[in-house]
Amino acid sequence: MYEALMEIMEPRIKQREDAIMKKGIQGTVDTLRDFGHKDAEIKTV
């Protein structure tokens, strides 16, 4: 039963993980910008 549930829920879980990751990355970029780092510099990190 666990396997069947995971098969059904896996795309939704992956979508949520991706959204969380994107939000975290965007927050980090925003913080670096607040500290005066330029986009070209952020891209190299």
Image (cartoon, helix red, strand yellow):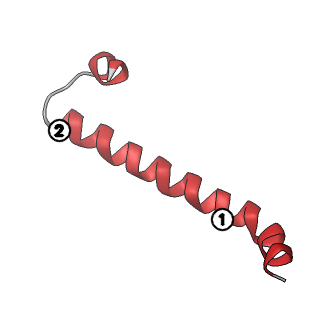
Q: Amino acid at mark 1?
A: Ile
Residue 9: percent from the left, percent from the top? 75, 71
**Residue 22 at x, y percent in the picture:** 48, 47
34 to 8, vertically: above or below: above
Q: Amino acid at mark 2?
A: Asp
Residue indicated by mark 2: 34
In the image as oriented, which residue stretches furthest toward the bottom?
Answer: 1
Label ID, residue 41: none
Q: Are marks 1 and 2 in contact (CB under 8 Å)?
A: no
Q: Give percent across and percent down for residue 31.
A: 22, 42
Return the x and y of residue 33 as percentages of the image width and height: 22, 34
Q: Quadrant for residue 5, please give it.
A: bottom right
* Residue at 40% in and 43% down: 25
For marks 1 and 2, give the CA distance: 32 Å
Nearer to us: label 1 or label 2: 1
The residue that label 1 is drawn on is: 13
Q: Nearer the viewer, residue 11 or 35?
A: 11
Along the line of sight, which residue is nearer the eye, 44 or 1?
1
